[in-house]
Image: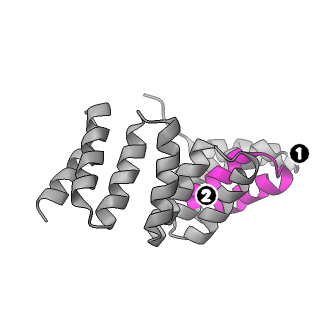
Amino acid sequence: MIDKDYERASQVLTTVISDSPDHAPAYYLLGMAKLESGKKDEARSDLTKATELNPGWITPRLGLADLHLANGDYRLALQESQKVLDVYPDHREALLSAAGAYLKKGDYDKALEVFSRVKKSSPDDPAIHMGLASVYAAQFKIALALREYEEALRLDPNRIDGLNSIVRLLVK
């Protein structure tokens, strides 16, 4: 098993940044290492610096969108996702991040619209069906939610989150 030494990785990347303060990839990797080690505020700072140094690089923007989504700042998550979608309108990860943010902030119609859009290009992706099911469950459309959870499980029988969601719906 490989030990994940985020502290050592951070030290190496900090040295790279000291030597090359405009090294966007080092800031991105440092941000991701800090994120993995639970230092969310520092991670946000480094990911933001990577986007400032290379505004066209979408990977740190997606990292920021996911970080904002995890922190419950749906407005900022949507903002970062939209910056990617402005350049790449069909970018799957940015669309999923935006859909997740819409879902979390309670804009179910918009979440449904975005998840449905992604489903057209990825109909066999269990994550899309999980997202759709979550929207339907939030709207109390239980039959539709169950159908999507079951489809996610059909596509990936090992999805414990899908099975758990079905059970929760049925025992309500």
For residue 23, what is the image quadrant?
top right
Picture coordinates of residue 71 (x, y %)?
Answer: 52, 67
Which amino acid type is marked by label 2?
Ala
**Residue sitting at 50 percent across and 56 percent down?**
113
Q: What SS does tag 2 mark?
A: helix
Which amino acid type is marked by label 1?
Ser
Q: Say few, some or many: other residues with alpha carbon within 10 Å of mark 1 (under 14 / 14 to 19 / 20 or more).
A: few
N-terminal-most mark, 1 or 2: 1
Q: Quadrant of the N terminus?
A: top left
Disc 2: which residue: 65
**Residue sitting at 88 percent across and 45 percent down?**
19
Q: Which mark is residue 20?
A: 1
Compared to residue 19, the image places residue 77 above or below, namely: below
Q: Which mark is residue 49?
A: none
Picture coordinates of residue 106 (x, y %)?
Answer: 44, 71
Picture coordinates of residue 143 (x, y %)?
Answer: 21, 55
Question: From which residue to which does the magenta span run?
Answer: 42-67
Q: What SS does tag 1 mark?
A: loop
User: Is residue 39 something one can see in this rendering?
Assistant: no
Main SS category, magenta section:
helix
- Position of 139 compared to 55: left or right? left
- Position of 95 compared to 103: left or right? right
| Nearest-to-viewer mark from 1 and 2 | 2
Q: Quadrant of the C terminus?
A: bottom left
